[in-house]
Image: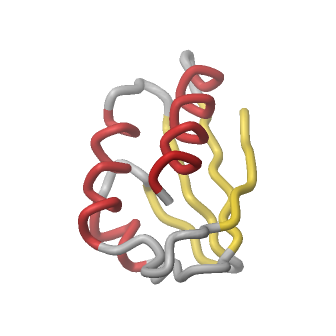
Amino acid sequence: MTEFQYTITDREGIHARPAGQLVKEAAKFQSAVTIHKGEKSGDAKRIFAVMGLAVKCGDEIRVCADGADEAAAAATLETFLKENL
């Protein structure tokens, strides 16, 4: 399992547009990708799971990738978050 933490800097947090883009990025990988915010977690490949976390500006999330291409998935998603959120 590969994981990283990231603090959301976008004023609006993870709202509909970036959530959709995040799901598309996660779906490119075979690995299971999970986003954790506090006690909650959701499948990063499902838009309702991502939106259900209600991630706001300043929230810290943990992204975990587990599978054959976990390192690539984690690196890609970390880059995506840094560039977009």
Q: Nearer the viewer, residue 72 or 80?
A: 80
Residue 16: x and y, percent?
Answer: 26, 70
Residue 4: x and y, percent?
Answer: 74, 46
> In this rendering, is residue 67 above or below 37?
above
Colour mapping: secondary structure
> In this rendering, is residue 50 above or below 39?
above
Residue at image location 29% in from the left, 70% down from the top = 48
Q: Nearer the viewer, residue 61 or 85?
A: 85
Q: Is residue 74 left or right of residue 28?
A: right
Q: Determine the image quadrant of residue 39.
A: bottom right
Residue 52: x and y, percent?
Answer: 39, 79
Q: Is residue 66 left or right of residue 53?
A: right
Q: Determine the image quadrant of residue 67.
A: top right
> In this rendering, is residue 61 above or below 37?
above
Residue at image location 48% in from the left, 64% down from the top = 42
Q: Quadrant of the N terminus?
A: top right
Residue 35: x and y, percent?
Answer: 56, 58
Residue at image location 51% in from the left, 46% down from the top = 83
> In this rendering, is residue 59 above or below 46?
below
Q: How many numbered discs?
A: 0
Residue at image location 61% in from the left, 34% down from the top = 74
